[in-house]
C-alpha cells in the first residue's frame, strides 16, 4: 500500500477502499471532505470504480463460458491468470478432458508449465491441453459427489458452477410439447415489478419476453418467459417457458438440450419466486 500526498494528508488504497492518514501518520476513520476533490483522492476513487467493474466483467465472462460450456484456448487462460480479478473468477473451477471426464479443480495456469489442478485423489497435477473445458454443472456426472468433495477441499468458487442450481429434464417429459407451465401464473401487483425482477436477476427483456440464450452443441437456443412488453402499473403474470432456435422458431421440448433446459428452468423458477404470495392467497 503506497501513500500519496493529498493536501495536508496522505491517501492510499487498502482492500479496494480509499484510506487516509494525517501528517502525524495516524490513520483516520474516513477521508476528510475538504480533500474530496484533491486529484489523488479523485484518481484513487476512479481506480476503485474501474477495478470493481473489471471484477464484475471478469466474473460475468467466466460465467458465460460456463453457461455455454465454451472450450477456452489454454493460451487465453494462461495470459489472464496473473490478473487477480481473472484468477479469482477462474480459481477452483472444475476442468474436464475432451472425453468429459473430470480432470480436477483449477489452481494455476502457466504458459510454460500448463494448468495446475487438484485431481479427485487430492493430488496436484499438471496438464497442457490446447483447450480448457469448463463444463456447465448439468453436464457433470455425479454432481452431488463432486460438491461433497469440493467442500472437503475447501473449494470456494466465485463463478457459479458446482453450486449453480440445475434442472434435469424429467423422464416423463412430453417430447412433443411446446411449453413448460410449471412456473407460469406467478402474479405481480404491477408489471413494472415483474420487469424489475428481470433486471434484478440479470436477465433482459426482448419483445415482451424475459430471455436467456445458450450455445449448445454448436447451435443457439433461447429460453423465453412472457413478462409483458411495457412496464405498466397493471397486474401481471409470468407466462409459460418456451424455447426457440436462432431464427425465432419454436422448438419442441424434446429438441432442447440439457444445458438450455436447465438454464431456462432456472430463469423461470427465479422469476416465479418473486411473485406476490399475498395476492395468490387472496385469489385462492
Image: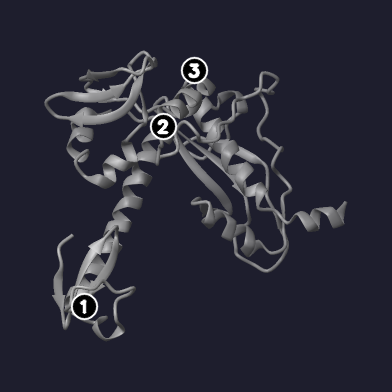
Q: Which SS class for mark 1?
A: loop
Q: Does residue 38 appear anywhere in the picture?
A: yes
Q: Which SS class for mark 2?
A: loop
| Mark positioned earlier in the residue sequence (3 or 1) | 1
Rendered residue at 24%/82% (across/down): 37
| Mark positioned earlier in the residue sequence (1 or 2) | 1
Residue indicated by mark 3: 141
Q: Which SS class for mark 3?
A: loop
Whole-number angstrom distance, CA of label 3 to CA of label 1:
58 Å
Horizontal side, residue 245 vs residue 241: left or right = left
| Quadrant position of residue 50 | bottom left
Give coordinates of residue 126: x percent, y percent.
22, 19
Whole-number angstrom distance, CA of label 3 to CA of label 2:
21 Å
Rendered residue at 23%/25% (across/down): 115
Residue indicated by mark 2: 154
Q: Nearer the viewer, residue 238 or 119?
A: 119
Structural crowding at the residue carrying mark 1, measured as other residues with C-alpha within 10 Å and reported as few (<14), some (14–19) or many (≥20): some
Amino acid at each position: 500500500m503506497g501513500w500519496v500526498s493529498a493536501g495536508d494528508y496522505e491517501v492510499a488504497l487498502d482492500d479496494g477502499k480509499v484510506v487516509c492518514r494525517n501528517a502525524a501518520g495516524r490513520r483516520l476513520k474516513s477521508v476528510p471532505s475538504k480533500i474530496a476533490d484533491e486529484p489523488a483522492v479523485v484518481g484513487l476513487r476512479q481506480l476503485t470504480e474501474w477495478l470493481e467493474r473489471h471484477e464484475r466483467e471478469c466474473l460475468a465472462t467466466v460465467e458465460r463460458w460456463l453457461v455455454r460450456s465454451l472450450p477456452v484456448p489454454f493460451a487465453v487462460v494462461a495470459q489472464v491468470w496473473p490478473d487477480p480479478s481473472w484468477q479469482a473468477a477462474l480459481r477452483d473451477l472444475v476442468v474436464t478432458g475432451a472425453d468429459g471426464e473430470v480432470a480436477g479443480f483449477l489452481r494455476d495456469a502457466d504458459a510454460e508449465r500448463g494448468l495446475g489442478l487438484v485431481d479427485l485423489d487430492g493430488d496436484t497435477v499438471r496438464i497442457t491441453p490446447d483447450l480448457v473445458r469448463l463444463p456447465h454443472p448439468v453436464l457433470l456426472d455425479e454432481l452431488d459427489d463432486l460438491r461433497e468433495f469440493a467442500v472437503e477441499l475447501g473449494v470456494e468458487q466465485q463463478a457459479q458452477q458446482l453450486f449453480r442450481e440445475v434442472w434435469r429434464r424429467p423422464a416423463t417429459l412430453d417430447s412433443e410439447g411446446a411449453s413448460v407451465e410449471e412456473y407460469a401464473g406467478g402474479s405481480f401487483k404491477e408489471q413494472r415489478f415483474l420487469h424489475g425482477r428481470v433486471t434484478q436477476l440479470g436477465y433482459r427483456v426482448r419483445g415482451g419476453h424475459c430471455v436467456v440464450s445458450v450455445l449448445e452443441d454448436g447451435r443457439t437456443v433461447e429460453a423465453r418467459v412472457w413478462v409483458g412488453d411495457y412496464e405498466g402499473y397493471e397486474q401481471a403474470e409470468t407466462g409459460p417457458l418456451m424455447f426457440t432456435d436462432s431464427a425465432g422458431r419454436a422448438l419442441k421440448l424434446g429438441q432442447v438440450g440439457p444445458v438450455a433446459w436447465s438454464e431456462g428452468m432456472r430463469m423461470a423458477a427465479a422469476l416465479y419466486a418473486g411473485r406476490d404470495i399475498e395476492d395468490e392467497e387472496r385469489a385462492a
